[in-house]
Image: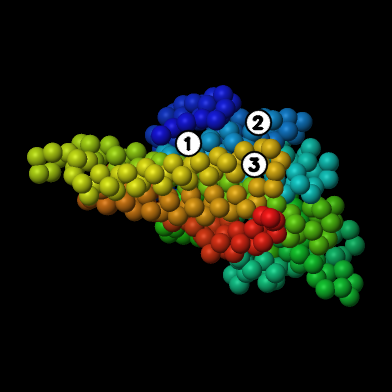
Amino acid sequence: MEYNLTSEQAQMREKAHLFVKEFVEPYTVEYDRKEEYPRELLRNLAEAGFLGYPFPKEYGGGGGSYLAFVTVAEELARADASASVIMLLNPSLVATPIFLGGTEEMRKRFLPLLFSGELLGCFCLTEPEAGSDVASLKTSAEISGDEFIINGEKIFIQQGDVADMGIVVCRVKVGKEKPKISVILVEDLNDRAVQRRRLQRKMGIRAATTGHLVFKNLRVPRKNLIGEIGDGFKIIFETLNGGRLGIGAQAVGIAQGAFDRAFKRAKQRVQFGRPIIEIGAIESKIAEMATKLEAARSLLYRAACAKDAKQDYRVLACMAKLFASEVANEVAYDAVQVCGGSGYIGELSDVEKFYRDARITEIYEGTSEIQRLLITRYLKEQSFE
């Protein structure tokens, strides 16, 4: 049941809907099968004004609300989750740390290029032995005069195989002090000191490609440090809080897209002399799917409104990401069940694609298990007396 809380949200939803009809729906099957990053889609998203929408206009943004921004992400995922990821990554995980901790010079130089689609970025956090446990990162940056020398390995990096630049989370050692988690902007990922490749045969979101990167004595100017040495944890968690709203929106969109198809099929498919939507077991399943979906959407919008109001939205972001991602998986699973054989075979429908795409939402930008830990931690910080 589509609804909007503001006129701005309604306008952006309609704009996204029209965009999807022209630039997303005709190509979803091709994108999924080719497993190649569609740079032209990024440019189209930029021209529509979606990439920088919630950022200040002085940096090339749209000056809009986060509520409207996540609504765009939801509408894109309703047709193709990959398109939603491609829209979200530059603003959520690349522009955000620059906006939060970068110098004014850095903001004015990089943000407009990220929002125009001229630059494609990636967020280099996860390593082979360090994902949810950020404190275990091994990638290091040694100070050498006016430069950092970066060595290490990153994996499961969204767009890491094709990105022009990257936000690299690493350890920086100063003198005899213990190395501190810090964030450095790498301007050129095509440098010879960076080896990278595409990770193949992904289960879902195949057009939003994923990379493996190795840094071998990569030299980066010290002025590219985002924030101060040791600010890494603060910048990472503030970045991921907003990113979780994006994943929550993607999950809601996936659930809605899967539901739309299951509902349509249930009305058309006739068994035992009547449409299967009139059979009790299917009626119950449809009702449960719709109820979960509406609850997830309401929680997502509540969290986005809290962010727009500059309230502490951390716990709501975790809740929205956790609940919406689990709902996406449950609704997509039930959609395949309702559609039966046609839902299982990609030649007959794209329902199976929604099922594949939904799975990642419980894994990236904090697993469901991590969200539960964070929710409890944040609740303990608050007073309910």
Residue lying furthest bottom: 176
- Taking the image as shown, residue 261 lies to the left or right of residue 317, namely left
Q: Amino acid at mark 1?
A: Glu
Q: Which residue shows up at 19% across the image and 40% down it?
A: 278
Q: Alpha-carbon distance for marks 1 and 2?
A: 17 Å
- In the picture, the quarter occupied by the C terminus is bottom right
Q: Is residue 195 above or below residue 61?
A: below
Image coordinates for residue 204, horizontal then vertical, percent:
43, 53
Element type where label 3 sits in the image: helix
Residue 330 - label:
none
Between discs 3 and 2, the one toward the N terminus? 2
Nearest to N terminus: mark 3 or mark 1: 1
Q: In the figure, 148 relative to 108: above or below? A: below
Q: Is residue 345 above or below residue 61?
A: below
Secondary structure under the numbered disc 1 in the rendered image:
helix
Q: Is residue 347 in sight in this rendering?
A: no
Residue 219 position, x and y percent, is 78, 60
Q: Reading the chain from its start, which is encountered first: label 1 or label 2?
A: 2
Q: Residue at x 87, y 68 (%)?
A: 174
The disc placed on residue 306 is 3
CB contact under 8 Å: marks 3 and 1: no
> Residue 90 falls in which quadrant of the image?
top right
